[in-house]
Image (cartoon, helix red, strand yellow):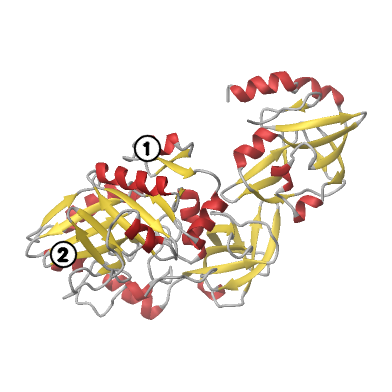
Amino acid sequence: MKQTCLYDKHVALGALMSPFAGFDMPIQYTNITDEHQAVRTACGVFDVSHMGEVTVRGVDAERYVQHIFTNDVKDAPKGKIFYGMMCYEDGGTVDDLLVYKMGDGDFFLVINAANIDKDWAWMQEQAKGFNIDLQNRSNDYGQLAVQGPEAEQVVEQVLGLACKELEFYTVKTIGDVIVSRTGYTGEDGFEIYAGPNYINECWDKLIQSGRCKPCGLGCRDTLRFEVGLPLYGDELSQDISPIMAGLGIFVKLDKEEFVGKEALLKQKTEGVAKKLVGIELQDKAIPRHGYSVLNADGETVGEVTTGYHTISSDKSVCMALVDSSYAKLGTPLQVQIRKKVFAGEVVKKRFYDKHYKK
Amino acid sequence: MATVKEGLYYSESHEYVKVEGNIGYIGITDYAQHALGNVVYVDLPDVDDEVTAGEEFGAVESVKAASDIISPVSGTILEVNEALDDEPELLNKDPWENWIIKVELSDKGELDSLMDAKAYEAFCENA
């Protein structure tokens, strides 16, 4: 199993380690609830060095990114960041990713750890006929996510990285270090990409400062879930298109061309068979990934993608992929949890409001 | 460090039975609650349900995951610890005091196949 450049630090802190996407990753250091609350109320740091990085450079770089990416990066200013997906011809999702415009003909793509090999193969295949230098830099970069309402002060004062002026979804480089105002928690925050030595240095400073709690992947999932952010493998997959997942605003169908455009356009205009919804249960029982969703008559009409008893709002809620006829807000639905069936209804997929600095 | 209580019977899936005559109090061990982390929900069975040794009768859920509770013995449920409905975290605070179900044992011979405190302590150390 692979390890990130901070593996020894996690073990020394007594983290509960568990396999994720081929890496031995910290799930929690103390407990998920405390770490979750630290990010909501103050500041937390995550080792997300498992994430993949791909660079696209050259005269055709923009045209290539436009070809593989659902969002529109054409003529974007330097430093702008886009969220979107790479899709197959049939509209299914290869991966969701961030595209950083580092400069003209220079893009930095951040992909999911679990998908690095698959994405890399697909991206190389799509690169035929483009004059670009495509590089998989996943092993070269470590990554930290510093997240929470105090993240700006912590990054400025503890790490000495000037980030105050960075707007939401923009990036800058400080020497070899890449700093962006992004994250996966619904809070303000920054992501820092650099080589292993610098990442270790930052981690030590952050932990020693006492102003930033080490946070594991456990609360990374509860945080992103509460604000309705998708996780590839749960809410997006080869079988779940961005249109089905309700992420149509990141699919620019007025763009000239991109892989999957025709299929996604068809889904958008003709409708999709299944849609991602939020469900809130009346009971405290917890819906989990894979549990069946039933209609009022007890017929199976979908499946839970992620569910929790939320930490910030104390409710049992889930995201679920259901037949589109049951996707309307307020529709009564039930979830089968072990031997029992629990009543609930369709609600918005956002269970907690985001607090971005925009 | 997880505590183990003398005089109880233990299963390999980290449940205990405290026996008083024909009555058994079934709960999860301190080791189990440590491993689970914050308990946020307990799926309780109903009074009069039958439980069977080696079969699940409910579940304990942490933030992250659900774990089945396996009955170490067979019998009929006489009482369910309803307090866990409102305060599932009682299992973290004191798993020994907060048993989950009270059962009328149908076969006390089953206790012979469970571990005593000493054996369970050794089992946890090797886990």
Taking the spot 22% from the left edge, 69% from the top edge, the residue there is: A258
Image x and y of residue B96, in percent: 77, 36
Residue A288 falls left or right of residue A47: right
Q: Position of residue A78 (x, y in %)?
A: 17, 70
A354 or A330: nearer the viewer: A354
Tell me: residue A132, above or below residue A250.
above
Q: Which residue is mark 1?
A: A7
Amino acid marked by disc 2 = Tyr
Side of A314 where A128 appears, left or right: left
| Chain letter, disc 2 residue | A
| Residue A207 in view (yes/no) | yes
Which is nearer the eye, A176 or A352? Answer: A176
Name the residue type under label 1. Tyr
Q: Is residue A20 above or below residue A250?
A: above
**On residue A64, which mark appears?**
2
Q: Residue furthest right?
A: B21
Image height of B110 relative to A282, above or below = above
Q: In this rendering, is residue A34 above or below B13?
A: below
Q: Is residue B112 left or right of residue A111?
A: right
Counting other residues with Cα less than 10 Å from the Cα at mark 2, is it few (<14), some (14-19), or many (20 or more)? many
Q: Secondary structure at mark 2?
A: helix
